[in-house]
Amino acid sequence: MTRFLSPLRRLAGATLGVTCLLAAATQASSAQSTPTWAKYNAKTKTASLTIIAAYGQDTYNFDGGSNGQLTFTVPLGAKVKVTFSNNSAQMPHAMEIVAYDGTLPTTTPPPPPAFPGAASPNYQHGTPPGGTQKFSFKATKAGKYLLICPVHNHVKFGHWDWFVVSKKATTARAVLKP
């Protein structure tokens, strides 16, 4: 019986070892593939944001956040450079920063951008599936704004998050809450 258990123990130990290695490799791969959503250059006062619609499995999200789970914060006066990508294989998406008046904007057409240039090109019709666009604007007024997808009232499906321009912020950041 001892001879029989010894090979089984070795097999169990080897299986456990392989499982641990695979789990570690999966975590490392996942961590390496997650983009840095917000960077800030204090010298040039430039916030660089990476915003991806349909990130992961849900088609109505920005960087994995929907229904206000994600908050981008930038310092007042920052130049904001955005790289916007649409990861959806099915539909167009866009990105726009709009004023927040206590309600979600569900009108067609959507409200105008809160800052000149604070929307992806052709934002009312969207970026085609798989497309990437770059644009920039200056965050000139402190406050809490909405980051929305204005295409086909996607806001109604939870495709919105927060964008904060802060007098106290010294860097750009993105915070995703579960």
Image (cartoon, rainbow, N blue to C red):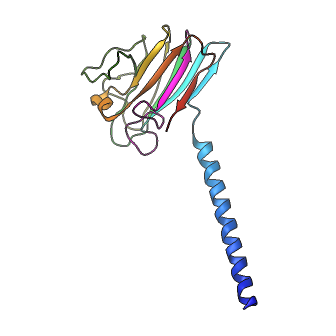
Image position, residue 25 (x, y; %)? 65, 54
Q: Residue furthest bottom?
A: 1
Identify which residue is drawn at 58% across, 43% down.
33
Quadrant housing the N terminus: bottom right
Which of these two is toward me, 126 or 56?
A: 56
Against 141, is 109 above or below? below
Q: Quadrant of residue 11?
A: bottom right
Identify which residue is drawn at 46% across, 43% down.
56
- Is 120 colored magenta in this rendering? no
Quick check: 153 left or right of 161?
left
- Looking at the rendered structure, the number of numbered marks drawn on it comes to 0
Image position, residue 75 (x, y; %)? 57, 14
Magenta stretch: dominant secondary structure: loop
Which of these two is toward me, 4 or 31?
A: 4
Identify which residue is drawn at 67% across, 68% down.
16
In magenta, the rendered stretch is 55-77
Against 13, is 94 above or below? above
Q: Does residue 120 appear in this view?
A: no
Against 135, is 32 above or below? below
Q: Does residue 139 appear in this view?
A: yes
Which of these two is toward me, 152 or 86?
A: 152
Image position, residue 20 (x, y; %)? 67, 61
Quick check: 172 left or right of 69?
right
Q: Quadrant of residue 173?
A: top right
Q: Residue furthest left?
A: 108
Quick check: 6 left or right of 161?
right
Which of these two is toward me, 63 or 119?
A: 63
Identify which residue is drawn at 61% across, 44% down.
31
Q: Quadrant of residue 172?
A: top right
